Image (cartoon, rainbow, N blue to C red):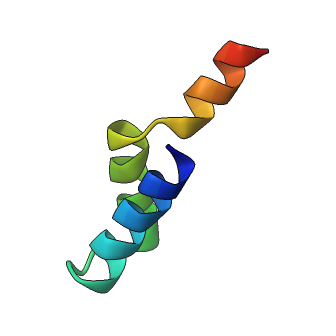
Amino acid sequence: MFLNHEIYESDLVINRGFSQQQAHLLAQKQYPWSDSIQQTR
């Protein structure tokens, strides 16, 4: 899930003109990888 998050975030910044912060928020909604880490603890 982390890799999908990063690929999506990069696409938003590079190809779609989003800021890094905006892209990160959108990627986190689409691929909430950090939530899955907290659930496994």
Residue drawn at 68 percent across, 28 percent down:
37
Write the residue at 35% across / 38% down. Answer: 29
User: Which residue lies most toward the left here?
Assistant: 16
Task: Please state the total of marks drawn on the protein image.
Answer: 0
Q: Residue at x 44, y 71 (%)?
A: 20
Q: Is residue 28 left or right of residue 35?
A: left
Q: Is residue 32 above or below residue 3?
A: above
Is residue 30 shown above or below 35? below
Task: Name the quadrant of the C terminus.
Answer: top right
Farthest right residue?
A: 41
Compare residues 32 and 40 and report the one nearer the observer.
Answer: 40
Residue 1 appears at what percent x and percent y? 49, 43
Residue 15 vs residue 22, the one in the foreground: 15
Residue at screen point 59% across, 25% down: 36
Q: Quadrant of residue 33?
A: top right
In this rendering, the answer to whether 7 lies above or below 33 is: below
Q: Nearer the viewer, residue 8 or 16?
A: 8
Judged left or right of residue 18, residue 1 is right
